[in-house]
Amino acid sequence: MNAEAHNEKRGLMVADEGVVVLFDRNEVTSVVRTPVARGALDPSAAGTTRPGRDRSRADLQGVAWNGHEFLAVGQVPNDSGGYSFNYIAYASPDGSVWTQVGEFTLGPAAHSLTWGTTNKQWVVVGTTGNGAAVATSPDGVAWDSVPFGDDIGELFASTDSKGIVVVAGARGHIVFSPDTKIGWGRAESQGSESIDAVVPTEDGFLAVDSTGALLSSADARAWRSAGTLPRSVSSLTPCGDNLIAVSDSQSKTIAVYEVGTAGVQQTVAEIPLKNDSYTSALATCVAGQWAILLSDGTVRYS
């Protein structure tokens, strides 16, 4: 699973080969695809061959909503069908029809996209292969790389709350900026585990690491423990007054947890799987109703 975004009317879940699943309160209304990738691609870029994939479309790695349009970023396959360092940005007013608007280079992996509300910038995060990779854009068309030290490591998550952009990743690193044009500050490292997701809350931020441990913060600078989920999770999504966390597969099930902003949680669903091949799932939410996209392409609802 790759990424989700939602507004008050529609939720989007994006996946490989340009797939976009649209969720409109209690039902999946359609599954669409972003256009065939076009532009100057680097055929010599490093990558691992993936036979049988559609090499004409980008694998979507991030999607976000900025108040008037969705933006999705996708990694372009190289000539051998493997991953390149080239990325394409697609824009859509409603998630149904997409237009390619920009191209940029980042690194071997992009993991998350968010909209910074203070200085009106898209922020995409990932890895250079040796450390953190970050790029920003005011419009999805022109992109600038942001220098980060290799000591921070790979970045897996990003969000914006109260005008502060937060990015997080390997070895518990959390980095924040009230204005991404000016600079970034570092929170104290939150241990040795990776921060896999960070989301906005009414009080600030909530993050979850690779063990399921929850962390909360009001200002992105100081973080405290907020409990631990029973399993590690593959998705953490704002939903109504709470959050929806979806566990990794275990014993042929995926668990769905409702998590309060203070970390209080309850299990709201156990989804049985046909086998143990499902490794992750992705959730989105519209008007308090959630939908979960499983690795096999099926969708479950609340």
Image (cartoon, rainbow, N blue to C red):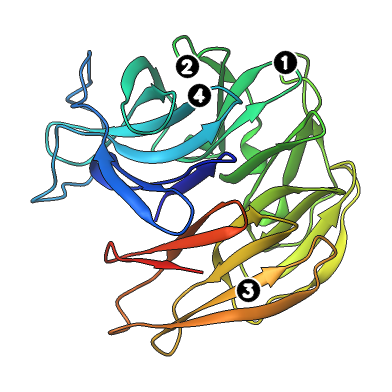
Badge 1: residue crowd in 10 Å (few <14, some 14–19, many ≥20): some
Q: Which mark is residue 140?
A: 2
In the picture shown, does residue 51 fall above or below 83?
below
Residue 61, image x, y percentages: 41, 41
Q: Earlier in the sequence, mark 2 or mark 4?
A: 4
Q: What is the CA distance from the residue labelled 3 to the residue labelled 1?
A: 34 Å
| SS for dot 1 | loop
**The disc labelled 1 sits on which kind of residue?**
Asn
Q: Residues within 10 Å of mark 4 (few under 14, many from 20)?
A: few
Callout in the foreground (3, 1): 3
Secondary structure under tag 2 reads: loop
Q: Is residue 109 visible?
A: no
Q: Residue at x 22, y 19 (%)?
A: 41
Give the CA distance from mark 2 to mark 1.
Answer: 14 Å
Question: Mark 3 — residue?
Answer: 257
| Mark toward the start of the polypeptide (3 vs 1) | 1
Q: What x and y, as percent, mark residue 68?
A: 55, 22
Q: Residue at x 76, y 55 (%)?
A: 206
* x and y, in percent, of residue 295 in the image: 32, 65
Depth check: 119 or 292 in front? 292
Upstream in sequence: badge 1 or badge 4: 4
Residue 266, x across and y down, in percent: 70, 79
Q: Which residue is mark 1?
A: 119
Q: Which residue is mark 4?
A: 69
**Amino acid type, label 3:** Tyr
How far apart are the two marked residues, 4 and 3, measured between alpha carbons? 29 Å
Q: Could you tell me which residue is drawn at 40 percent across and 24 percent down?
A: 92
Total numbered labels? 4
Of callouts 2 and 3, which one flags the residue occurring earlier in the amino acid sequence?
2
**Crowd around label 2: few <14 · some 14–19 · many ≥20 (10 Å):** many
Residue type for callout 2: Gly
